[in-house]
């Protein structure tokens, strides 16, 4: 029997709103399950059981078929996110292979707590270690090994840290200084209003201005890019955007 992927939603095309692929038109595959339970997670429905009934066990061919149906000729980029897709092995590698065979680039968002061999086939990989405000603990041995392997295999990857306060910013600087050879480094203001249903753009812009000011004053952040959650500025917390 063919191995399957636990999928909680497939959506798009929409605009990638974060990190090194900001502004990129992309389709999204969101997997269920995570080895973290971040305090401010904006997709806790992937692991807290509230949407367990929506999880579909799909073969790679079924997932790719849904992506092609949604995107048609309008999109040739796929972002794999979660939850933590790094919990999934062989079927994810097969999905990536299908995407590449049909001319799609593939991006990945993961916190860097697990390594999979298929990471080496990702076109645009974002490592987003979680800061103290998440109430999670970084396993530095795993992250060190992951960064080394990605670097040695010349995978296009970046580091992105979500920042809610000065403690998080100190953490971010420690991550960036730990991996000086990683060229692409990003800061993003955290969204503490993930459960609000209205327009949160004013709040997000205030947080972005705060992070701008902190970054402008700090020589340790000279080579770090500060970016918003672009999709949240435009669509707030609307699902499927």
Image (tube, grey):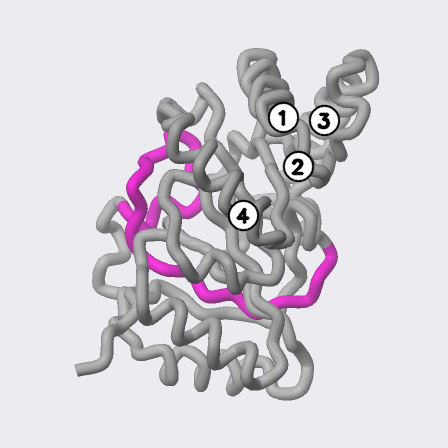
**Of callouts 3 and 4, the N-terminal one:** 4
What's the mark number on residue 182?
2
Local crowd size for mark 1, using a 10 Å CA cut-off: few (<14), some (14–19), many (≥20): many
Mark in the foreground, 3 or 4: 4
Q: CA distance from mark 3 to mark 4?
A: 35 Å
Local crowd size for mark 3, using a 10 Å CA cut-off: few (<14), some (14–19), many (≥20): few
| Residue underneath mark 4 | 150
Q: Position of residue 145 (x, y in %)?
A: 44, 37
Secondary element under disc 3, as helix, strand or loop, is helix
Q: Find out whether the residues at labels 2 and 1 contact each other: C-beta distance under 8 Å.
A: yes
**Of callouts 3 and 2, the N-terminal one:** 2
| Residue underneath mark 3 | 206
Q: Which residues are magenta?
A: 23-47
**Of callouts 4 and 1, the N-terminal one:** 4
For image coordinates 50% across by 45% down, the residue present is: 149
Q: CA distance from mark 4 to mark 1?
A: 16 Å
| Residue underneath mark 1 | 176
Instruction: Tell me, yes or no, whether the highlighted magenta stretch contains residue 45.
Output: yes
């Amino acid at each position: 029997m063919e191995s399957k992927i636990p999928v909680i939603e497939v959506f798009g095309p929409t605009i990638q709103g974060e990190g090194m692929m900001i502004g990129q038109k992309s389709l999204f595959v969101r997997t269920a399950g995570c080895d973290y339970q971040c305090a401010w997670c904006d997709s806790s429905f992937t692991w807290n059981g509230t949407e367990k009934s929506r999880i579909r066990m799909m073969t790679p061919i079924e997932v790719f078929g849904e992506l092609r149906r949604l995107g048609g000729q309008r999109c040739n980029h796929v972002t794999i996110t979660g939850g933590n897709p790094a919990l999934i092995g062989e079927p994810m590698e097969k999905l990536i292979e299908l995407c590449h065979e049909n001319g799609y680039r593939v991006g990945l968002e993961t916190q860097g707590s697990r390594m999979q061999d298929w990471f080496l086939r990702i076109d645009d990989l974002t490592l987003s270690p979680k800061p103290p405000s998440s109430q999670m603990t970084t396993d530095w041995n795993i992250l060190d090994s992951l960064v080394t392997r990605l670097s040695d295999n010349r995978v296009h990857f970046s580091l992105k840290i979500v920042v809610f306060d000065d403690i998080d910013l100190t953490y971010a600087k420690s991550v960036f200084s730990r991996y000086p050879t990683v060229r692409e480094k990003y800061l993003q203001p955290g969204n503490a209003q993930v459960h609000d249903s209205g327009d949160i753009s004013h709040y997000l812009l205030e947080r972005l201005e705060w992070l701008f000011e902190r970054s402008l004053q700090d020589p340790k952040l000279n080579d770090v890019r500060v970016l918003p959650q672009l999709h949240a500025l435009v669509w707030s917390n609307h699902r499927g955007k």
